[in-house]
Protein backbone atom coordinates (compact mmCIF):
# COMPACT_ATOMS: atom_id res chain seq x y z
CA UNK A 1 0.00 0.00 0.00
CA UNK A 2 1.34 3.44 -0.92
CA UNK A 3 2.02 5.67 2.05
CA UNK A 4 -0.53 8.47 2.37
CA UNK A 5 0.33 11.95 1.12
CA UNK A 6 0.12 14.58 3.85
CA UNK A 7 -1.76 17.73 2.89
CA UNK A 8 0.43 20.79 3.37
CA UNK A 9 -0.96 24.27 2.85
CA UNK A 10 0.94 27.26 1.47
CA UNK A 11 -0.48 30.67 2.38
CA UNK A 12 -0.66 33.38 -0.28
CA UNK A 13 -0.83 36.91 1.13
CA UNK A 14 -0.98 40.02 -1.05
CA UNK A 15 2.72 40.43 -1.83
CA UNK A 16 3.75 36.80 -1.29
CA UNK A 17 6.22 35.81 -3.99
CA UNK A 18 7.52 32.36 -3.26
CA UNK A 19 4.23 30.54 -2.76
CA UNK A 20 4.45 28.77 -6.12
CA UNK A 21 8.00 27.57 -5.50
CA UNK A 22 6.94 26.32 -2.06
CA UNK A 23 3.97 24.45 -3.57
CA UNK A 24 6.28 22.94 -6.20
CA UNK A 25 8.88 21.95 -3.61
CA UNK A 26 6.23 20.25 -1.44
CA UNK A 27 4.77 18.34 -4.39
CA UNK A 28 8.27 17.28 -5.46
CA UNK A 29 8.75 15.86 -1.97
CA UNK A 30 5.60 13.77 -2.04
CA UNK A 31 3.12 16.04 -0.29
CA UNK A 32 -0.26 17.14 -1.54
CA UNK A 33 0.43 20.87 -1.81
CA UNK A 34 -2.65 22.98 -1.08
CA UNK A 35 -2.79 26.71 -1.97
CA UNK A 36 -4.50 28.75 0.77
CA UNK A 37 -5.70 32.30 -0.01
CA UNK A 38 -5.25 35.05 2.58
CA UNK A 39 -9.00 35.78 2.74
CA UNK A 40 -9.85 32.33 4.11
CA UNK A 41 -11.38 32.51 7.58
CA UNK A 42 -10.66 28.86 8.29
CA UNK A 43 -7.99 26.45 7.14
CA UNK A 44 -8.89 23.43 5.03
CA UNK A 45 -7.97 20.04 6.47
CA UNK A 46 -4.15 20.25 6.61
CA UNK A 47 -1.26 18.34 8.18
CA UNK A 48 1.16 21.29 8.04
CA UNK A 49 1.35 24.91 6.89
CA UNK A 50 4.09 26.81 5.05
CA UNK A 51 4.19 30.61 5.10
CA UNK A 52 6.28 31.60 2.09
CA UNK A 53 8.59 34.49 1.37
CA UNK A 54 7.80 37.79 -0.30
CA UNK A 55 6.74 41.22 0.84
CA UNK A 56 3.31 40.73 2.38
CA UNK A 57 1.34 43.98 2.50
CA UNK A 58 4.35 45.84 1.12
CA UNK A 59 6.29 45.33 4.37
CA UNK A 60 4.43 48.41 5.64
CA UNK A 61 5.22 49.55 9.22
CA UNK A 62 7.54 46.57 9.84
CA UNK A 63 8.14 43.41 7.83
CA UNK A 64 5.34 40.97 8.66
CA UNK A 65 3.48 43.40 10.93
CA UNK A 66 0.34 43.76 8.80
CA UNK A 67 0.00 40.12 7.72
CA UNK A 68 -0.80 39.37 11.35
CA UNK A 69 -4.24 40.93 10.72
CA UNK A 70 -5.00 39.03 7.55
CA UNK A 71 -8.09 36.78 7.93
CA UNK A 72 -6.11 33.55 7.38
CA UNK A 73 -3.51 34.35 10.05
CA UNK A 74 -5.86 33.75 13.00
CA UNK A 75 -6.57 30.11 12.05
CA UNK A 76 -2.85 29.59 11.32
CA UNK A 77 -2.04 30.85 14.82
CA UNK A 78 -4.68 28.50 16.29
CA UNK A 79 -3.28 25.62 14.22
CA UNK A 80 0.23 26.31 15.57
CA UNK A 81 -0.97 26.70 19.16
CA UNK A 82 -2.70 23.32 18.85
CA UNK A 83 0.67 21.80 17.96
CA UNK A 84 0.34 21.93 14.17
CA UNK A 85 3.52 22.06 12.08
CA UNK A 86 4.22 25.54 10.69
CA UNK A 87 7.27 26.55 8.62
CA UNK A 88 7.91 30.23 7.88
CA UNK A 89 10.40 31.15 5.18
CA UNK A 90 11.91 34.65 4.97
CA UNK A 91 8.84 36.94 5.10
CA UNK A 92 7.04 33.96 6.64
CA UNK A 93 9.65 33.96 9.41
CA UNK A 94 9.08 37.70 9.93
CA UNK A 95 5.30 37.14 10.07
CA UNK A 96 5.66 34.35 12.66
CA UNK A 97 7.82 36.63 14.84
CA UNK A 98 5.32 39.50 14.57
CA UNK A 99 2.44 37.12 15.33
CA UNK A 100 4.21 35.96 18.50
CA UNK A 101 4.62 32.35 17.37
CA UNK A 102 8.41 32.65 17.24
CA UNK A 103 10.72 34.64 19.50
CA UNK A 104 12.74 37.62 18.29
CA UNK A 105 12.65 40.15 15.48
CA UNK A 106 14.25 40.67 12.07
CA UNK A 107 15.89 44.00 11.38
CA UNK A 108 17.50 45.74 8.41
CA UNK A 109 20.70 43.98 7.32
CA UNK A 110 23.73 45.47 9.03
CA UNK A 111 25.23 46.19 5.60
CA UNK A 112 22.03 48.02 4.51
CA UNK A 113 22.35 45.95 1.33
CA UNK A 114 19.87 43.47 -0.03
CA UNK A 115 21.70 40.14 -0.10
CA UNK A 116 20.84 37.65 -2.82
CA UNK A 117 23.18 34.68 -3.10
CA UNK A 118 23.82 31.11 -2.02
CA UNK A 119 24.99 30.84 1.59
CA UNK A 120 26.24 27.99 3.73
CA UNK A 121 24.19 26.99 6.75
CA UNK A 122 25.15 24.74 9.61
CA UNK A 123 22.47 22.42 10.94
CA UNK A 124 22.47 22.78 14.74
CA UNK A 125 19.56 20.44 15.44
CA UNK A 126 18.36 17.36 13.65
CA UNK A 127 15.63 16.43 16.15
CA UNK A 128 13.07 18.88 14.73
CA UNK A 129 10.26 18.11 12.27
CA UNK A 130 12.04 20.42 9.80
CA UNK A 131 15.58 19.02 9.89
CA UNK A 132 15.23 15.31 10.66
CA UNK A 133 16.61 14.37 7.22
CA UNK A 134 19.80 16.37 7.86
CA UNK A 135 22.81 15.11 9.74
CA UNK A 136 24.13 16.92 12.79
CA UNK A 137 26.61 19.65 11.87
CA UNK A 138 25.86 19.19 8.17
CA UNK A 139 26.47 22.20 5.94
CA UNK A 140 23.60 23.11 3.60
CA UNK A 141 23.90 25.41 0.60
CA UNK A 142 20.67 27.40 0.31
CA UNK A 143 20.11 30.89 -1.17
CA UNK A 144 19.11 33.98 0.78
CA UNK A 145 17.39 37.05 -0.71
CA UNK A 146 16.46 39.65 1.85
CA UNK A 147 17.04 43.19 3.04
CA UNK A 148 15.71 42.66 6.56
CA UNK A 149 17.24 39.46 7.86
CA UNK A 150 19.29 40.53 10.86
CA UNK A 151 17.91 38.30 13.60
CA UNK A 152 17.73 39.73 17.08
CA UNK A 153 16.81 37.15 19.71
CA UNK A 154 14.97 38.05 22.90
CA UNK A 155 17.04 37.65 26.09
CA UNK A 156 15.07 34.50 26.96
CA UNK A 157 15.94 32.61 23.76
CA UNK A 158 17.27 29.18 24.69
CA UNK A 159 20.34 28.04 22.72
CA UNK A 160 18.43 24.84 21.90
CA UNK A 161 15.94 26.89 19.88
CA UNK A 162 18.60 27.71 17.28
CA UNK A 163 18.15 25.25 14.42
CA UNK A 164 20.32 26.80 11.69
CA UNK A 165 23.32 29.14 11.70
CA UNK A 166 25.11 30.93 8.88
CA UNK A 167 28.64 29.56 8.45
CA UNK A 168 29.80 33.10 7.53
CA UNK A 169 28.13 36.34 8.53
CA UNK A 170 25.43 37.29 6.02
CA UNK A 171 23.39 40.09 7.55
CA UNK A 172 24.69 40.82 11.05
CA UNK A 173 22.36 38.38 12.83
CA UNK A 174 23.18 37.86 16.49
CA UNK A 175 25.21 34.64 16.87
CA UNK A 176 24.82 34.11 13.09
CA UNK A 177 21.33 32.73 13.69
CA UNK A 178 19.55 31.81 10.44
CA UNK A 179 16.64 29.74 11.76
CA UNK A 180 14.88 29.20 15.09
CA UNK A 181 12.04 27.09 16.42
CA UNK A 182 9.54 27.70 19.17
CA UNK A 183 9.89 26.04 22.54
CA UNK A 184 7.57 23.18 21.62
CA UNK A 185 9.44 22.60 18.35
CA UNK A 186 6.40 22.58 16.02
CA UNK A 187 7.02 26.04 14.52
CA UNK A 188 10.20 27.03 12.69
CA UNK A 189 11.27 30.12 10.79
CA UNK A 190 14.34 30.67 8.64
CA UNK A 191 15.55 33.49 6.41
CA UNK A 192 17.14 31.34 3.65
CA UNK A 193 14.92 29.88 0.94
CA UNK A 194 14.94 26.07 0.84
CA UNK A 195 12.17 26.14 -1.82
CA UNK A 196 14.68 27.65 -4.26
CA UNK A 197 17.13 24.78 -3.71
CA UNK A 198 15.22 21.56 -4.25
CA UNK A 199 16.83 20.30 -7.45
CA UNK A 200 20.44 20.13 -8.68
CA UNK A 201 19.31 22.18 -11.71
CA UNK A 202 18.67 25.06 -9.30
CA UNK A 203 22.28 24.96 -8.11
CA UNK A 204 21.57 22.98 -4.95
CA UNK A 205 19.13 20.36 -3.76
CA UNK A 206 19.92 20.87 -0.07
CA UNK A 207 16.64 22.69 0.56
CA UNK A 208 14.82 19.47 -0.30
CA UNK A 209 16.08 18.06 3.02
CA UNK A 210 13.98 20.65 4.86
CA UNK A 211 10.86 19.84 2.81
CA UNK A 212 11.43 16.08 2.99
CA UNK A 213 11.75 16.38 6.78
CA UNK A 214 8.54 18.38 7.00
CA UNK A 215 6.63 15.98 4.74
CA UNK A 216 7.87 13.01 6.75
CA UNK A 217 6.81 14.61 10.05
CA UNK A 218 3.42 15.58 8.62
CA UNK A 219 2.92 12.03 7.32
CA UNK A 220 3.83 10.56 10.70
CA UNK A 221 1.18 12.76 12.31
CA UNK A 222 -1.35 11.77 9.68
CA UNK A 223 -0.74 8.08 10.38
CA UNK A 224 -0.97 8.58 14.14
CA UNK A 225 -4.24 10.47 13.76
CA UNK A 226 -5.88 7.68 11.71
CA UNK B 1 -7.72 64.96 19.37
CA UNK B 2 -4.40 64.54 17.58
CA UNK B 3 -1.46 62.46 18.72
CA UNK B 4 2.07 61.97 17.47
CA UNK B 5 3.95 58.76 18.13
CA UNK B 6 7.73 58.73 17.86
CA UNK B 7 9.16 55.24 17.37
CA UNK B 8 12.89 54.84 17.86
CA UNK B 9 15.34 51.96 17.62
CA UNK B 10 15.97 50.95 21.22
CA UNK B 11 19.14 52.06 22.89
CA UNK B 12 21.85 49.50 22.20
CA UNK B 13 20.23 48.14 19.03
CA UNK B 14 22.48 48.51 15.99
CA UNK B 15 20.95 51.12 13.67
CA UNK B 16 22.79 50.91 10.34
CA UNK B 17 20.47 53.54 8.82
CA UNK B 18 21.48 55.97 11.53
CA UNK B 19 25.15 55.19 10.91
CA UNK B 20 24.71 55.83 7.19
CA UNK B 21 22.97 59.14 7.90
CA UNK B 22 25.69 60.24 10.34
CA UNK B 23 28.30 59.29 7.77
CA UNK B 24 26.51 61.27 5.03
CA UNK B 25 26.21 64.32 7.27
CA UNK B 26 29.95 64.05 7.88
CA UNK B 27 30.50 64.17 4.10
CA UNK B 28 28.57 67.45 4.04
CA UNK B 29 30.93 68.88 6.63
CA UNK B 30 28.62 68.56 9.64
CA UNK B 31 30.10 67.27 12.84
CA UNK B 32 27.70 64.54 13.96
CA UNK B 33 28.78 61.85 16.41
CA UNK B 34 25.71 59.64 16.04
CA UNK B 35 22.35 59.63 14.29
CA UNK B 36 19.44 57.27 14.93
CA UNK B 37 16.60 56.83 12.46
CA UNK B 38 13.09 56.09 13.69
CA UNK B 39 9.61 56.91 12.46
CA UNK B 40 6.76 59.32 13.15
CA UNK B 41 3.11 58.26 13.19
CA UNK B 42 0.51 61.04 13.31
CA UNK B 43 -2.92 60.02 14.53
CA UNK B 44 -6.28 61.76 14.53
CA UNK B 45 -8.46 60.03 17.10
CA UNK B 46 -11.69 60.28 19.04
CA UNK B 47 -11.06 60.65 22.74
CA UNK B 48 -12.92 62.64 25.41
CA UNK B 49 -9.79 63.98 27.09
CA UNK B 50 -6.02 63.92 27.00
CA UNK B 51 -5.59 61.17 29.59
CA UNK B 52 -7.84 58.72 27.78
CA UNK B 53 -6.20 59.61 24.45
CA UNK B 54 -2.79 58.88 25.93
CA UNK B 55 -3.92 55.53 27.36
CA UNK B 56 -5.47 54.60 24.02
CA UNK B 57 -2.36 55.51 22.00
CA UNK B 58 -0.11 53.66 24.43
CA UNK B 59 -2.19 50.54 23.84
CA UNK B 60 -1.80 51.06 20.08
CA UNK B 61 1.97 51.26 20.52
CA UNK B 62 2.11 48.10 22.58
CA UNK B 63 -0.11 46.12 20.21
CA UNK B 64 1.09 47.35 16.82
CA UNK B 65 2.92 50.62 16.31
CA UNK B 66 6.16 49.61 18.05
CA UNK B 67 7.83 46.22 18.36
CA UNK B 68 9.00 46.48 21.92
CA UNK B 69 11.85 44.04 21.51
CA UNK B 70 13.58 46.47 19.16
CA UNK B 71 11.81 49.83 19.45
CA UNK B 72 10.92 52.38 22.10
CA UNK B 73 8.18 54.96 21.70
CA UNK B 74 7.05 58.36 22.93
CA UNK B 75 3.50 59.65 22.74
CA UNK B 76 2.69 63.30 22.35
CA UNK B 77 -0.93 64.47 22.58
CA UNK B 78 -1.76 67.62 20.63
CA UNK B 79 -4.92 69.64 21.19
CA UNK B 80 -6.94 70.60 18.17
Image (cartoon, helix red, strand yellow):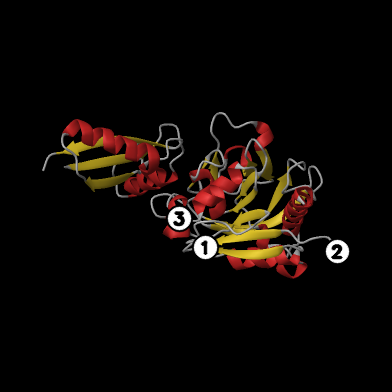
Q: Secondary structure at mark 3?
A: loop
Callout 3: chain = A
Nearer-N-terminus badge (1/3): 1
Instruction: Locate residue A215, reporting x and y percent.
Output: 74, 56
Contact flag, marks 1 and 3 (Cβ < 8 Å): no
Instruction: Locate residue A133, reporting x and y percent.
Output: 80, 50
Nearer-N-terminus badge (2/1): 2
User: Within 10 Å of the Cα at label 3, are there few (<14), some (14-19), or many (20+) other Cα atoms?
Assistant: some
Nearer-N-terminus badge (2/3): 2
Q: Secondary structure at mark 2?
A: loop
Q: Quadrant of residue A43?
A: bottom right
Instruction: Locate residue A38, reporting x and y percent.
Output: 49, 61
Q: Which residue is mark 1?
A: A16
Q: Quadrant of residue A201?
A: bottom right
Q: Is A108 positioned to the left or the right of A28 in the image?
A: left
Q: Which mark is residue A2?
A: 2
Looking at the image, is mark 1 or mark 3 nearer the viewer? 3
In the rendered image, residues at marks 1 and 3 fall on the same chain: yes
Q: Nearer the viewer, residue A137 or B79?
A: B79
Instruction: Locate residue A10, reporting x and y percent.
Output: 60, 61
Amino acid sequence: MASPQPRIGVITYPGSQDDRDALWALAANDAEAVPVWHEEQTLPDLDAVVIPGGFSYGDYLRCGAIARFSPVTAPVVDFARDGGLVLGICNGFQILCEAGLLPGALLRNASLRFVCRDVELRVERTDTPFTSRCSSGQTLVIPVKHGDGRYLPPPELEPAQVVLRYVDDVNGSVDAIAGVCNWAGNVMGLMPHPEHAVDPLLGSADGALIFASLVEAARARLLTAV
Amino acid sequence: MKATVLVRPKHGILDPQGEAVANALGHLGFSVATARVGKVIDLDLDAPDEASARTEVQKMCEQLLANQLIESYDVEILHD
